[in-house]
Amino acid sequence: MRKLLLAPVLLAALPLGGCIKFGAEPPPSLLKLEADAAMPTGQTVSSATARAITIAVPSVPQELAVTRVPVRSSDTAVAYLKDAQWVEAPNRMFARVLGDTISVRTGRVVLNLRQALSDPGARLGGELRQFGVDADSSAAVVVYEATLVRDRPAGTDGTRPAMVFEKRRFEARVPLAQMTPTAAGAALNQAANQVAGEVADWVGK
């Protein structure tokens, strides 16, 4: 009798499945970053003739550990722009913009941590401190605190000098005409490329 009594309950519950939603609906479109400079298709660079640099994905504070666009209204208050969402974590996209820009502007061979095994060349890392919108100034803001270990050429005896770390803060602000996902994405892309260009000049050839 118990099996017969359970059947109507299960059947009655089935129509409810079509009404259940898990999580919020995605926005109509997603945002992404693109480097202004990219290595031409078919061009080859070799560590035999060019210096190398290893670029690590920047660390981020918790407000950037998501795919949404933060909006700061004060030093202690953060919200997120409605319907604005990246295709992936912003620090990973920013690392690729850095890599493309540094490769084109310096001619270096750009490696990631997995590729840099025996000789990583120079090493670039750091933290992406801000990557969002400042509501008070209506501007897209990118702040990157970079650390750089420059190439250490071997001496005549084959030894290398001790590592020396350099640290530098880069910041770019791009005015935002409208507080919309499209405008915010375009302004942040411009700010990210500006920072990447300054970092490339700092790294040098």
Image (spheres, rainbow, N blue to C red):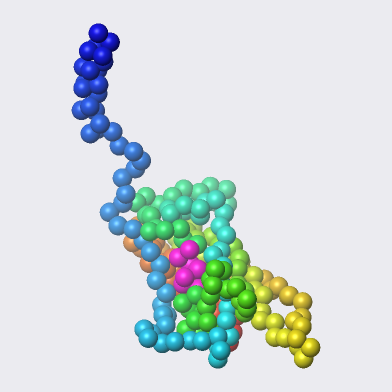
Q: Position of residue 122 (x, y in %)?
A: 63, 78
In the rendered image, residue 104, in percent from the top left (x then y), is placed at 47, 84
Q: Quadrant of the N terminus?
A: top left
Q: Is residue 139 left or right of residue 2?
A: right
Q: Is residue 148 left or right of residue 132?
A: right
Instruction: Locate residue 11, reporting x and y percent.
Output: 21, 22
Left or right, residue 123 beside residue 101: right
Residue 56 visible? The answer is: yes
For the point 33% across and 58% down, the residue is 30
- Position above or below: 122 against 176: below
| Foreground of the two, 131 or 103 | 103
Query: 191 or 53: nearer the eye?
Result: 53
Specify whether residue 166 is painted magenta: no
Q: What residue sits 70% from the left and 86% below the top?
A: 153
9 vs 103, left or right, is left
Q: How many marks?
A: 0
Segment colored magenta = 92-98
